[in-house]
Image (cartoon, helix red, strand yellow):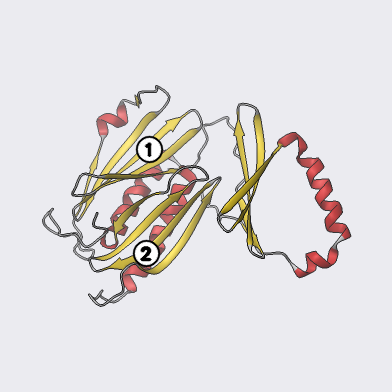
Amino acid sequence: MAEAGSKNTNGGGNGRGGAASQQQRGPERNRNRRPDQAGNVQELATRMITIQSKRFYLDVKQNTRGRFLKLAEVGASGIKSRVTLAMSSAAELRDNLTEFAEFYAQLGPSSENDPDDDKLKTETIFKDSRRYYLDLKQNSRGRFLRIAQSMERGPRSHIAIPAQGLVDFRDTLTELLDEYGVDDMDDGQPKLPDSVHFRAENKQFFFDVRSNFRGVFLRVSEVQRGVRSSITIPESAWPRFRDAFTTYVDESPKQIEEGAGDIARPEQPDG
């Protein structure tokens, strides 16, 4: 599938680097919330935007765990690629799209001599057990933003947005977020704490608060050389784990002063 630079088949430009961009709404689907075949997912809104020879669908959906956004890319060959984000992650994506669009606007024209798949700018979004890797890249066909979704279990999926259409894509996403909000959970459901991760020596540690029908729990994962091991701690045991760690911290001040790595917490979007 061509990542970027495909011939513009839509006719006309939009003043943003010559990328044709057409947007369609789904008013009928907005009014009539439609469950999927399983009967537990509702489609609240859909937008379609065309950038060069690609079509992108932005769908706001809702299930028993809350609202989420599904992004789908359909290339000229008809092959579809998808990524799914929580609404709060979609808000982070919107903010990152602004930064990527501004960075792209400052770049000079691409050249056939540019190395393929050279990463020009990268960012990562963390959400529970999911990671979203945003890479502005270039190849012989042009520049594009690759959004890759990686899950703890399951294959990685991605979409590629031609760089000329980043502003239009962001504006379409902003419309949906303004209308449907950036909260993941339905009203009345508790909001879980944000994920935390840090690196210590040659290991990475991830702390993800999750919930299921048994209740809330903390999953602590250690990743080393691509191998992940995890434990889960029920919410009722958190105080005892805290007390145990506090005891070791108090008794080992030298290790704490030296530091074991920088803790990274995802920034929260405004509002």
Is 157 located above or below residue 103 in the figure? above
Q: Nearer the viewer, residue 98 or 221?
A: 221
Q: In terms of sequence position, does the residue under pointer 1 or pointer 2 come before the other? A: 1
Residue at image x 75%, y 34%? Answer: 236
Q: Nearer the viewer, mark 1 or mark 2?
A: 2
Mark 1: secondary structure: strand
- Tell me: 249 left or right of 203: right
Residue at the disc numbered 1:
60
Q: Where residue 62 sits: x, y (%)?
A: 43, 32
The residue to which callout 2 is attached is: 136
In this orientation, which residue lies closer to the viewer: 159 or 239? Answer: 159
Q: Position of residue 41 (x, y in %)?
A: 41, 28
Along the horizontal axis of the image, is 191 left or right of 232? Answer: left
Q: How many marks?
A: 2
In the image, is residue 96 above or below residue 189?
below
Residue at the spot 54% in from the left edge and 31% down from the top edge: 187
Name which residue lies at 65% across and 27% down.
214
Quadrant position of residue 212:
top right
Badge 1 local density, few (<14 within 10 Å), some, or many (20+)? Answer: many
Residue type at mark 1 is Val
Q: Residue at 44% x, 64% y: name it.
A: 122
